[in-house]
Amino acid sequence: MALFCASHLHPQAVYAQFKVQGHVYDAESKTPLPGANVFIANTTKGTSSVLDGSFTLTGLPAVRLKLVVSFVGYKTQVFEVLPGEPLTFKVMLEPSPEMLSEVVIRARRSSRAEWLSNFALFKQYFIGLSDNYRSCTFENPRVIKFDNHNGILTAISDSVVVIENLGLGYKLRFLIEEYELNVLLLHIRYHGQVVFEQMTTTDEEQKMTWARNRLMAYYGSLMHFLRALYNRDLSEEGFYVDLVNKNTGLQIAPVTAYEQVRVRSDAYNNKFIKLESIKNYNLMLDSVRSTPAEPLLNFKGELQVQYIHESEDYDYQVLRYGRGRASGNRIQRSRMFMLTPEALVQPNGQLYPEDGAETAGYWSWELVAESLPLDYDPAVDKQILGITGRPTEVRKK
């Protein structure tokens, strides 16, 4: 769900680090709230407020971030942190009255068998079925309430959902704000805030396994793609793109925008393959308003993305193409559509706004089981493994 050369822009190396601090109070009594969860969404940066309600988070990159403050029995608050803004917060948490929506009422009335059936469906389309899904366990699944009505599965939770990913070596604390699965179309829409806690071990073999799995999750991921797009080195990182009409599938970029390339592909046992790819970044980015520091994603139609150094998961191929067409050598193919007129590409591999684009294809297969924090640094895992290039993966058939 990246390995940078020394000359590449790295989110932690280029941008000055800063800190945020503040206090958390009960909005009604005005008394401090010690023990509140305070974290930067989608990162490993998290802490708890202390006895006087104060908190401090340090070592944050100067990019657009989300500060999340939660406490059991109170409404969660999310603050947008922009570089250059005041970084001291006075957080007033309001008690959260019990929600009495129709969804919650129906969820309460569901039987144990119904809950288990809904949870199995939710887990499949939240954790996913990719390589690491068997290594993911829910510590407190019963805090999730479900409703399956008219072919739409919804999930809500007023407590943090704790997920342990023993495949990647993270414990995730997830605030599910919205989850909706169209069971017939298999279309997923969810929104929430998550903080990653990296697991520790003295077992050197376990450390290496986690490092290898994290690198494999990173390569070809949306985060990897967006970081490469930010640095304008897509082909160097193994990404080749096409721009097509969503309805017809026909190329909408001029012929002169493409180049024919012959490149070595790890997915094809380091053999050469031929590809056609867009070479003009201005067809993906706003050519007038983008700057090297703030590239703006802006394209019409559908961006088709091929990652040549890793094959699609065999189980994904069976699901997508059928068992007869599944192959060990099929490079990863994903798709992207704009949902907003434009979206800022940040150096850490995140879009702003986060819902500026929607993905499909292989990226939609890689769900929570393959997710990495935005402050993930692949150089650390490379050092653990003692490698300088990509780890080679042999997928099971």
Image (tube, rainbow, N blue to C red):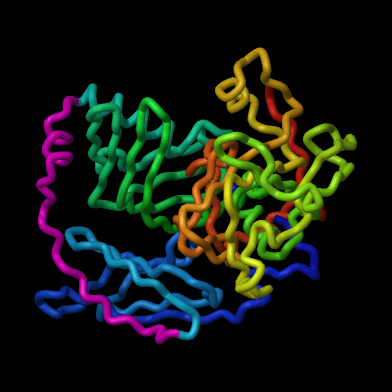
Image coords of residue 145 (percent x, y): 23, 39
- Residue beneath the point at 31% across and 80% down: 54
Image coords of residue 336 (percent x, y): 57, 46
Q: Is residue 263 above or below residue 312?
A: below
**Most foreground residue, 316 or 58:** 316
* Residue 113 image-quadrant placement: top left
In this rendering, would 388 be left or right of 291?
right
Q: Is residue 376 above or below residue 33?
A: above
Q: Is residue 334 above or below residue 48?
A: above
- Residue beneath the point at 65% across and 54% down: 224
Q: Count every numbered label the image shows and give the total.
A: 0
Residue 326 on the magenta span:
no
* Residue 8 image-quadrant placement: bottom right
In the image, the segment drawn in magenta is 85-111
**Most foreground residue, 77 or 228:** 228
Is residue 206 visible to us here?
Answer: no
Identity of the residue furthest to the top in this view: 324
**Most foreground residue, 68 or 209:** 68
Is residue 298 visible to us here?
Answer: yes
- Residue beneath the point at 59% across and 61% down: 297
- Residue beneath the point at 51% across and 35% down: 133
**Most foreground residue, 316 or 34:** 316
Quadrant of the snapshot with the C terminus: top right
Image coords of residue 252 (percent x, y): 67, 46
Image coords of residue 95 (percent x, y): 14, 64
In this rendering, would 278 be left or right of 374?
right
Residue 105 on the magenta span:
yes
